[in-house]
Image: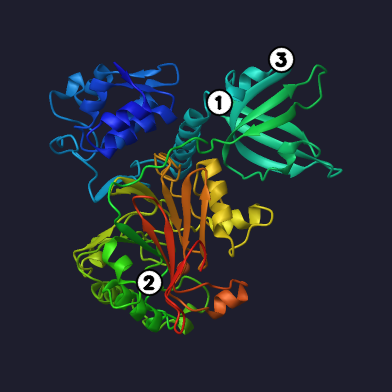
Amino acid sequence: MLEGTAPAARQGPGALRGDLVRYFEEHRKLVEAEALTLLLTAPEPVLLARRLIRESGAAAPFVTVGMVSRALWPPAAGNGPVVSGGGAPAAPEAGPTPFRLVAEGFSAPTPGLRPLEAYGGLFRDRFRALKRILHGRADLRGAVPIRELRGREGPASVIGMIREIRPTAARRHLLVVAEDESGAIELLLPKDRPAARTPWILDEVVGLTVRMPRERGRLPLLTGVVRPEVPALRPARTAPSARRVLFLSDLHLGSKSFLTESWQRVVGFLHEEGPAPEIAREIAHVVIAGDLVDGIGIYPNQERDLALHDIFEQYAELARRLRELPERLEILVVPGNHDAVCPAEPQPSLAPEIRTGLPPNVRPLGNPATFALDGVLVAAYHGRSFDDLIPALPGASYARPTEVMKTMLAMRHLAPIYGGRTPLAPLPRDGLVIDPVPEILVTGHAHTYGVDQYRGVLLLNASTWQAETEYQRMRNITPVPARAAVVRLDDLRVETLNFEPERPVLSRGSAG
Ligand SMILES: [Fe+2]
C-alpha cells in the first residue's frame, strides 16, 4: 500500500512519520507504508530518507521496503545498521520528542583531496541536490544536459549553476553563463524579458528555459528562470502542545557594548518576574543563532571594543550568562562568524575545550543546523551570507533581513556565492542546501529584527544584545538590539519582546 501525505500524517503515531511522508512527496516519491515503518527504526531517519532519494534517482517514483532494508543492512555488511551515527536502531517514535536533530550542515571533509578536487565535489553535490528538487517542474519536464543543446533549434530547458552574469557591450541586455556536469552555455537575456528583472545570484542552481537559434552564430535566448523554491501548498506542521520557543541571536559576550541591563531583563522575564509570566512559563527552548561571543581579531581594531581580551574568558562569561537562565530550558546554540570555530561554512559546533564550561542544558550545534522542537522543524543559520546577498540583491538591506531570507528559500540555499565574504568549506556534502524545508528559519548577523512569512515558512531575524559599535557606524549598520521573538509551537504565532530599558516588554505582532 502506498501512503499519501495526509493519510499518513493522520494515521501515524508520531509527527516524524508525517514529516517523512511529506519529505518524500516534496521529492515526488511515494513511500510504502512498510518502508516508512522500517525507516522510522533508523537512528537518523531523515538522513537515510535523503540518501534513499539521492540514490533512487528521478526515474524511480516509489520507495519500497526492499530499498530501505538494503540501505539499512546492505548484503556485504551483515545484519548491522549502517546509517551514519551508528548504534542500535531506535524504536518507532510515539510522538514528537522535545528535541530531535534532523541535520547539521557540517560534515566531515574527505581526507587526502586537493582543494580544487574538494571544491569540485562540493559544487557537484550542490548541483545534484538542487537538480533533484527542480526535476519534475512543469516547465522543466524535458530538461536536458547542456551538452545536448548543441545542434538543437527552438525551445528547450536545462538545469544549471549560474557561473557568470554580465551586461552586453552596449549594456542593453544581459549575458548569462550557466553550467552543468556536461558543459556550459552562454545565453542572451534581453532586457525586456521578465527574467531580466529577477535577481541573478552567482553559483545558485536554477532551471532555465531557452530558445535555441536557427541561424548559426547567434546566441541562444534565455526565456525564463525557475528557482527550486518552497512548494506553494505546504501545510505547516505544528506541535500538539502550546509550548514556546524564545529566539535570540548575536550576544557578543566579551564586547564592551554587551547590553547587560537588557540581558538582566531577559533573565528576569524567563524567571517569570517580568510583566508576561504566562508566556515565560510556557517557554521550553531557547535558540541562539550565533555570535555567542565577540571573538578576537574579527575586524580591524576590534580590541578597542573588547571588555574581555581572552577568548576563553569570553566563553566563560557566556557560560555564566546562560547559567542565569532557568535550568528547565533547553538552550540550542549555533556558532557565528565571531565564534571560535572554523569560519568556513557550514561551521562545526563549538569545540570540546570551549563547550566544556557551558551548563548542561546547553546543546551546541553546527551552523547551520536543522532540528525539530516538539515536532516543528527549525533551521538556524547565523546569516553571514547577508554580506554577499545584500549587495547582490537590488534594494536589499540589513534593515530588512527577512527579504533576503525569502531569496534564500527560493534558491533553497543559504549561501550560494563562492569567493565573496562568506568562506565556503570544501566538504563532500553541501550542507547549506535548504532541504528539508523548515517551518521556521531563524538567522542573526544583521543585528536588526524581523518577522515575516514566506510560503508558509516563518522567518525570524533575531536581533542582538550588543549596542552599536564604531565598526557598525562605519559600515552604516543601525542595530535594533534587545528584541526577542517568542513562537508558540502549536500555531506558530509570534510575540515580540522588547527588553530595552524603559520600554514595555511585550509587543504582540510582527515587529518590535
Ligand atoms: Fe553579530
Q: 31 above or below 396?
A: above
Gap in angstroms between the C-alphas marked 3 and 2: 57 Å
Residue 347 in percent (x, y) is at 38, 54
Residue at 24% of width from left, 51% of height from top? 98
Amino acid carrying label 2: it is: Val
SS type, badge 3:
loop
Q: Earlier in the sequence, mark 3 or mark 2?
A: 3
Residue 77 in percent (x, y) is at 17, 24
Q: 117 above or below 499?
A: above
Labelled disc at residue 293: 2
Q: Earlier in the sequence, mark 1 or mark 2?
A: 1
Q: Is mark 1 within 8 Å of ligand 1?
A: no
Labelled disc at residue 173: none
Q: Which residue is mark 3?
A: 151
Q: 393 above or below 196?
A: below
Q: Is mark 2 within 8 Å of ligand 1?
A: no
Residue 160 in percent (x, y) is at 59, 31
- Residue 106 shown left or right of residue 386 in the figure: left
Crowdedness near tag 3: few (<14), some (14–19) or many (≥20) residues, C-alpha within 10 Å: few
